[in-house]
Amino acid sequence: MSACGYENGLISIDEAIQYILSTPKTLATESILVKNSLSRYLSEAVYSPVNLPSFDQSAVDGYALCSQQTDSKEQVFQLIGEVRAGEESHLALSEGQAIRIFTGGKIPDGTSTVARQEIVKIMDDQNIRIVENLNIGVDIRREGEEVKYGQCLANVGQYMNIGSLAALSMAGVQRVSVYKQAKVAVVVTGDEVAQSQNSLSNAQVFDANGPLLKNWLKQYGIDAHVIHVEDQASAVTALFEGLKSEYDVIITTGGVSVGDYDFVRPCSFDVGFQQVFWKVKQKPGKPLYFAKYEKQQKNCYLLGLPGNPAAVYVCMQVYGKLLLDALQNKREQKSGFKAKITHDLKADHRERFLRMVATFNQSTLEVSALAKQQSHMLSNLMLTDCLVRIPAAKQINAGELVDGLFI
């Protein structure tokens, strides 16, 4: 073993990413209600069951008019009724007639155009006058102008965010086929981690990793089971034996390095896991461990994170998201950004993920590193909005472009 960063057996960040993307087998699919599909990926394309709009409708509050005259200014129309949004009306217009209509109301037969109420003068209960010229067909939303019946609304792999969920709901889609969400267990190792404030001793620390991972996964749509385990090989082995057949993913914190009480890796071997990789040439998070258990149609993947909470946070942003996405057949890296760095950075033997803050300076995106970057420190996450990847063994000068990932 040589100087830090040159240890034999370390793989690159890009190699680790490719292993994470290519190793997991895609989860099965299921049909669920659209309203419950947030944070899921579609396993089948979705086609519109209707036209959108599904009928000609008014784009404004105003009056539906019937007139073939090109000069509508000062023209008087006989008012014969009213159509509200959601109301089925059988009124029809003849030349010179008008119907009061509201936004979203169904356009009556015979309508040539709609006059918004701001350009209409009410003369009496039965007559209105137009005070501006109107083109034929204005302020009418035509049937199918946004979406045609049978049109593809969403392809396989579409991520269901709030916008896509709303778009499918508007088209009347009731159910979608999605990849199943991973069932995840979080295992916090370490006798030094107190499980509660009442149990904290003078030689222990508060648990940041459990709440961090529980809520990180919650944002992803996963209700993870968090378990604390003592630093005993028998306890870790027994826990893995029980979890591997029940969960799709086990995420551990601590216990993946080379210490006397680092049992995650050897205990995973004892219960049938196969190592995909161990140790990445990066900072923080060098002892990152990834393993798979694939037996008799049951697959489980173990992502062993270091114990220091900043390394946990960074590795979840870079690798955890990729693993969960790959299980839902999304096997591509999240696109990042390029920005100018505002200060110099000294070279380091390993590639680094630095917590930074991004700002715009006269339309130029700039990033600045925050203080307290050590892997046991989290206080700068109050300000962090991006991770910036700094190449190994390279001095970075102020003004250079660097690669970042918004978080």
Image: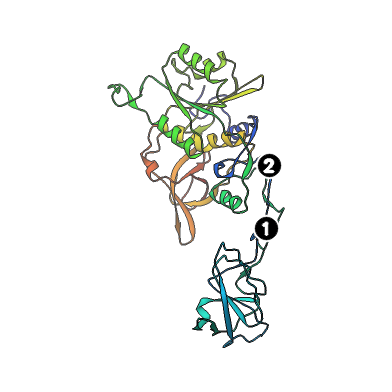
Residue 51 has which mark? 1
Residue furthest to the right: 150
Name the residue: 40% across, 35% down. Answer: 374
Q: Are marks 1 and 2 in contact (CB under 8 Å)?
A: no
**In-image side of 121 versus 92 (left or right):** left
Amino acid tagged 2: Glu
Q: Which residue position is annotated with label 2? A: 44
Residue 4: image tag: none
Quick one: 282 or 125, which is closer to the camera?
125
Residue 136 placed where, x, y %?
Answer: 65, 78
Q: Is residue 128 above or below residue 170?
A: below
Q: Is residue 49 above or below residue 350?
A: below
Pick the residue in front: 79 or 193: 79
**Mark 1 belongs to which amino acid?**
Asn
Q: How far is mark 1 from mark 2, CA to CA?
A: 20 Å
Sequence-first disc among 1 and 2? 2
Looking at the picture, does residue 384 appear above or below residue 248? below
Residue found at x 49% / y 46%: 396
Counting from the top left corner in percent of width and height, residue 145 is at: 67, 63
Q: Is residue 351 visible?
A: no
Q: Position of residue 54 (x, y in %)?
A: 65, 60
For the question of whether residue 244 can be seen, the reply is yes
Q: Is residue 90 above or below residue 286?
A: below
